[in-house]
Image (cartoon, rainbow, N blue to C red):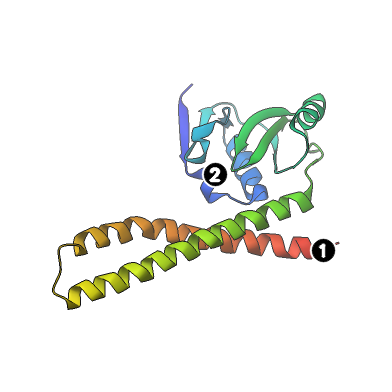
């Protein structure tokens, strides 16, 4: 059966519940997730298969790996791998009763907040670099030096998608995490 790559899925669905929904929809459309690996951040591999009902759990737990892994495996879940520092599990089911969710929602919210802060710092660093490059470009242009302008423009163009993604990710993650951390 042919394989299908979903490009940047891990980066588009950075909230664990969004990733779960994406994976479950893919399964219902006949795309079975293959094991996750190092390249899964950039491309998730699926295999065309018969549509099936699958519950996915994307868990960002801080528990001991050996105890955690064995407990979940003993409960019938299949380990798919990790992506963006989260464990991805799957469990097929029939009928309308979905498998019980075992994820710690507070831990996931804390994980999202931490990730959001990291993306905010990256965005801030990139903004500072942009400002410094613009100041340098203006200074060189005033002095009549134009040989560095193309290099600065290329660097700024390459950085722009990363800057925009960092801003988007930080807002999305923090907006998800804060209300859930306030709830008791």
Q: Is residue 154 left or right of residue 71?
A: left
Instruction: Report x, y in % for residue 92.
Output: 72, 29
| Residue ranking furthest to the right | 184
Dot 2, how many residues are within 10 Å of its Cα: few (below 14), some (14-19), or many (20+)? many
Identify whether 13 is placed above or below 41. below
Q: Secondary structure at mark 1?
A: loop
Q: Nearer the viewer, residue 1 or 102?
A: 102
| Residue ranking furthest to the top | 1
Identify whether 154 is placed above or below 23. below
**Quarter of the image where one finds residue 31:** top right
Residue at 58 percent across and 38 percent down: it is 26
Residue 90's tag is none
Pointer 1 residue: 183
Residue at 78 percent across and 53 percent down: it is 106
Residue at 79 percent across and 46 percent down: it is 104
Dot 1, how many residues are within 10 Å of its Cα: few (below 14), some (14-19), or many (20+)? few
Pointer 2 residue: 10
How far is mark 2 from mark 1, CA to CA? 27 Å
Q: Is residue 8 left or right of residue 89?
A: left
Q: Nearer the viewer, residue 147 or 155?
A: 147
Instruction: Report x, y in % for residue 124.
Output: 49, 65
Q: Nearer the viewer, residue 100 or 133?
A: 133
Identify whether 168 is placed above or below 100. below
Residue at 52 percent across and 33 percent down: it is 38
Instruction: Report x, y in % for residue 55.
Output: 71, 37
**Quarter of the image where one finds residue 179:** bottom right
Mark positioned earlier in the residue sequence (2 or 1): 2
């Amino acid at each position: 059966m042919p394989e299908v790559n979903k490009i940047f899925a891990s980066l588009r669905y950075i909230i664990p519940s969004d990733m779960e929904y994406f994976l479950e929809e893919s399964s219902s459309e006949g795309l079975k997730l293959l094991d996750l690996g190092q390249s899964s951040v950039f491309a998730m591999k699926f295999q065309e298969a018969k549509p099936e009902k699958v519950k996915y759990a994307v868990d960002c737990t801080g528990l001991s790996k050996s105890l955690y892994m064995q407990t979940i495996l003993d409960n019938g879940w299949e380990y798919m791998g990790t992506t963006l520092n989260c464990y991805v599990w799957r469990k097929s089911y029939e009928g309308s009763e979905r498998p019980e969710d075992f994820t710690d929602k507070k831990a996931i919210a804390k994980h999202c907040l931490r990730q959001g802060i990291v993306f905010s710092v990256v965005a801030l660093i990139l903004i500072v670099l942009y400002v410094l490059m613009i100041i340098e470009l203006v200074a060189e242009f005033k002095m009549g030096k134009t040989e560095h302008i193309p290099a600065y423009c290329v660097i700024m163009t390459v950085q722009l998608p990363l800057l925009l993604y960092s801003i988007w990710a930080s807002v999305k993650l923090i907006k998800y995490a804060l209300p859930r951390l306030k709830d008791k």
